[in-house]
Amino acid sequence: MSTISTSGLDEITESLKKLSTDIQSELIDKMLDAGAEECVKAWKDTITEYDLIDTGAMRDSVAVSKATKKGSVREVY
């Protein structure tokens, strides 16, 4: 049986709890946007790597759309 130990996570969790809701939301939005941009880059790189380019339309169509908010959930497509 494996054992995993961590140190410092409790301190990070407590620090994040102390941030105001606005700051948390702003940070989460920035992280979501950055992650979406990285996904777009990876998709485009994969399309190019596997030579899936005929006209370039598929590669050029991969992008981050405007974020939507459904209740307390924010989504990026």
Image: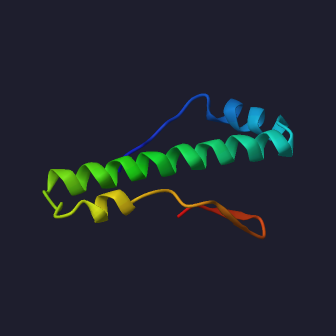
Look at the picture and state if 13 lies above or below 75.
above
Q: Residue at x 25, y 59 (%)?
A: 56
- Compared across the picture, whether 74 is left or right of 14 comes to left
Asked if residue 21 is positioned above or below residue 69 in the image, the reply reads above
Q: Residue furthest bottom?
A: 70
* Towards the viewer: 71 or 3: 71
- The residue lying at 61 percent from left, 60 percent from top is 66
Q: Quadrant of residue 71?
A: bottom right
Residue 35 location (% of width, % of height): 50, 47
Q: Quadrant of residue 67?
A: bottom right
What colour scheme was applied to this rendering of the protein? rainbow
Give 58 or 42, whichever is nearer the viewer.
58
Whole-percent x, y for residue 55 in the image = 21, 63
Q: Residue at x 26, y 48 (%)?
A: 45
Q: Is residue 39 left or right of residue 31?
A: left
In the picture as drawn, the residue positioned furthest to the left comes out as: 51
Count the labels in the image.
Answer: 0
Q: Position of residue 26 (x, y in %)?
A: 74, 43
Quarter of the view holding residue 62: bottom left
Foreground pick, 47 / 57? 57
Residue furthest to the front? 55
Q: Which x, y percent locates residue 25?
A: 76, 47
